[in-house]
Image (cartoon, rainbow, N blue to C red):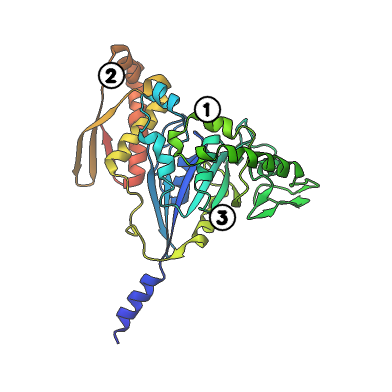
Amino acid sequence: MNLNVVRYFSQKLSHRALEVAVIGAPNVGKSLLTNQLVRAAVSSVSSKMDTTTQNVEAILTEDNVQLVVCDSPGTIGLRHAKETMGRSRDDVILTAPEAALQRAEHILVVQDATATGDYIHHRVMHLLHRHSHIPSSLVINKVDLVSRRSDLLELTRILTNGRVAGAPIKTSEKVIGRLGASSSGLRLHDDSVTVQDETWQEQFRQFRKIIAIPTHKVGFGETKRLFANVRGWSSFDAVFYVSSLTGEGIEPLRDHLKKLSTERQWRMDEMAITTKSPQHICIDSVRAALLDTTPSNVAYKLKPRITEWKVEGEVLQIVVEINCDKERIGRLLVGKGGRRIAEIGKRVNDHMHTLFARQLFQV
């Protein structure tokens, strides 16, 4: 028997993999979280909502485990897509969040710890109910911006309906990872949650037809009314507290996902970091820079286009054209003394250089 052959098949069989979908309301930090999980800036990031307009698969292969993480656009409604971005009912920005769940074996629901509303977005709730067979975890992001970490305990109770991993949260003293000192005497389970849940169950029976319809085909107002009195999801397997900006809490989340992986062959090459083409990454990077440096009503309407993509040795030269329908928009884009367009070029250059580890010139 050839021992090399035996060793080869043994190594192949020991490969593990997990498909993960990242969903959430707009601007909660899904893309930055995805980048942190896979240790690469695959998804473009800006301070504005709608930076991600279609699903992006990011890949991490390490410790004999392959995580394929699907970053999805924020859950917006048709009116916003039409009026702000000029999109139609079946545009990918509306269909992508649900499409991200088609391969998913685990869902990460990302919640902004600093958001004014202590509830899971109604569009996200609709997706969770439609795909309740897929295990999910709650990821409370931006904890670096929370001054009183003990407040996260109450937020967790609300967003989970007082239940995690099928059991009530009923602990008088709780320490949340690296989030600081314990909070004594804080009762995390509230019987009123059960009453609310029972009331909603009757409402759910009345609206079960809405749950059967793909999320993007249900009116924004319909899902808002359906989940008007619902703040949390009772079926989360785990809760994580992270800062996608600083990296706090990312490692425990990544390790958890690795433990959930199952033994099978990898779908992606072990050297791959994304299924997204370099050209697509470049255009999205330009869009993100435009969103951060120009007014939203201008940035959303600009359509960058690559007119030249040339590799010469270790140098990648890219020419991106941005057509402006009005001269004043062109002047705005260039900025005083060309400073704004130079800043956009530098941002894109830095992003692409980090990914491709080569010298890059923007023209």
Query: Which amino acid, by three-letter code, is at mark 2?
Result: Cys
Mark 1 crowd level (few <14, some 14–19, many ≥20, 10 Å Cα): few
The percent position of residue 188, horizontal first and vertical second, equals 74, 46
Is tag 3's residue or tag 2's residue first in the polypeptide sequence? 3
Q: Nearer the viewer, mark 1 or mark 2?
A: 1
Q: Quadrant of the C terminus?
A: top left
* Residue at the image position 56 percent from the left and 50 percent from the top: 137
Q: Nearer the viewer, residue 96 or 273?
A: 96
Which type of secondary structure does the marked residue at label 3 adopt? helix
What is the distance, in whole Å, between disc 1 and disc 3 at their CAs?
A: 37 Å
**Side (left or right) of 2 relative to 153:** left
Q: Which residue is mark 3?
A: 252
In the picture as drawn, the residue positioned furthest to the bottom comes out as 1
Q: Are marks 1 and 2 in contact (CB under 8 Å)?
A: no
Q: Which residue is mark 2?
A: 324
**Residue at numbered disc 1:** 221
Q: Secondary structure at mark 2?
A: loop
Residue 52 visible somewhere in the drawing? no
Q: CA distance from mark 1 to mark 2?
A: 35 Å
Q: Position of residue 307 (x, y in %)?
A: 20, 32
Relative to 327, 28 lies left or right: right
- 119 vs 219, nearest the viewer: 219
> Going from the N terminus, do you reach mark 1 or mark 3 first?
1
Q: Quadrant of residue 303?
A: top left
Q: Amino acid at mark 1?
A: Gly
Q: What residue is rendered at 37% in x and 27% in y?
A: 290
